[in-house]
Amino acid sequence: MNKSDLIGKMAGDAGITKAQAQAALNSFITSSTQALKKGDKVILVGFGTFSVSKRSARKGRNPQTGKEINIAAKKVVRFKAGADLSTKVK
């Protein structure tokens, strides 16, 4: 399912227009991004939790040349599925 499929599904389920569903989804994405950028967690009870975690710098290898490279430290977004979502997917 891509973004436009999700917007169509949201519009149909909620009985709203696709434009309204797109505005709601874009608002969720923007709000979630801002919260994660500040270091907050985004918790959707029954669905899951989005959080930011730090990945430390490390050494790696270029697979083409075998040469050792330095991989910089960075922040990554993590998602942990909630119990309800995990149960429904199984």
Image (cartoon, helix red, strand yellow):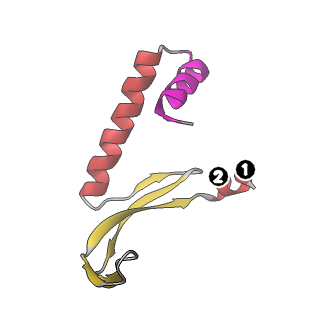
Over which residues does the magenta segment extend?
A: 2-15
> How far apart are labels 1 and 2 at the CA level?
5 Å
Q: Position of residue 15 (x, y in %)?
A: 56, 15
Task: Name the element at disc 2.
Answer: helix
Which quadrant of the view contains residue 19? top left
Residue that lies at the very extreme toward the front in this rendered image:
65
Residue lying at 71% horizontally and 52% vertically, measured from the top left: 89
Q: Is 27 one of the magenta-colored residues?
A: no
Q: Position of residue 42 (x, y in %)?
A: 40, 53
Count of numbered circles in the view:
2
- Give left or right: position of 71 versus 29: left
Q: Amino acid at mark 2?
A: Leu
Q: Vertical placement of 72 versus 11: above or below?
A: below
Residue lying at 58% horizontally and 25% vertically, measured from the top left: 9
Q: Position of residue 43 (x, y in %)?
A: 46, 54
Q: Which residue is mark 1?
A: 88
Could you say which disc has been placed on residue 85 in the image?
2
Q: Position of residue 74 (x, y in %)?
A: 27, 70
Front-lying residue, 23 or 61: 61
Please rate how many residues cluster around mark 2, counting C-alpha atoms within 10 Å: few if below 14, some from 14 to 19, many from 20. Answer: few
